Amino acid sequence: DTAVSQTPKYLVTQMGNDKSIKCEQNLGHDTMYWYKQDSKKFLKIMFSYNNKELIINETVPNRFSPKSPDKAHLNLHINSLELGDSAVYFCASSHSGRNYGYTFGSGTRLTVV
Amino acid sequence: AQSVTQLGSHVSVSEGALVLLRCNYSSSVPPYLFWYVQYPNQGLQLLLKYTSAATLVKGINGFEAEFKKSETSFHLTKPSAHMSDAAEYFCAVIPSSGSARQLTFGSGTQLTVLP
């Protein structure tokens, strides 16, 4: 059983389109995250939800909108895609304590053409 | 803001040689520290973590790391490298106090293992 699963794994789309990435975890964690990994492998947090409540919202264009229907799911919707949005997007989950590591999904490689 | 610095964006070792990947943190209060590994086209896997218990932490795949407060370091080591260890390694930190609670990553070190 996959602990943190993301779909799709690959996403190729044209500029201006709207797309969504879905994430689900079956670990019973109460906190979920979206990270962006750029072409130089640098990882930066975008959003975090705890029990469906947004708790971290880094400086991200408002074209990006996370949605958490329940604490096991965190989706990322992106409007009006731009070339610079091309990256690998990782979903992760954890317990809410500081000393817990995060469990990551396998990533979604988004390519905007 | 809490940060970690990984010295050496690329490290090459021969198979069977010692692996040493360096990580330093930048806070006066020791944070919680983590090492993750990323194999090509895969997600990040937790290797080990320091959460203020034992300073020498053993992880998966034969890796270990030692927390040294005096040096603000948490270097990752493995006595004998295998070809399968070739991957990107990330040091990461969560502050142990304060309002910031998210995991912040270093810039990564690409490990190459030579036959």
Image: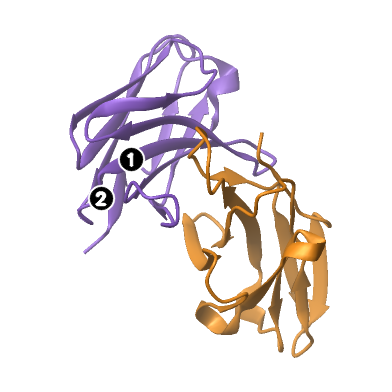
Chain colours: A purple, B orange
Residue B7 visible in the current orientation = yes
* Residue at the image point whose x is 83% and y is 56% from the top: B7
Residue A113 visible in the current orientation = no
Q: Disc number at residue A32? A: 1
Task: Indicate the position of residue A2 as horizontal and vertical percent values.
Answer: 26, 60
Residue count near mark 1 (Cα–Cα under 10 Å), binned few <14, some 14–19, many ≥20:
many
* Residue at the image point whose x is 20% and y is 38% from the top: A71
Q: Disc number at residue B27? A: none
Q: SS at mark 1? A: strand
Q: Is residue A39 left or right of residue A23?
A: right
* Residue at the image point whose x is 38% and y is 32% from the top: A48
* Residue at the image point whose x is 66% and y is 80% from the top: B83
Give the residue number, with chain letter if any, for mark 2.
A29
Q: CA distance from mark 1 to mark 2?
A: 8 Å
Task: Indicate the position of residue B103 as horizontal and vertical percent values.
Answer: 52, 45
Which of the pair B73/B112 is nearer the observer? B73
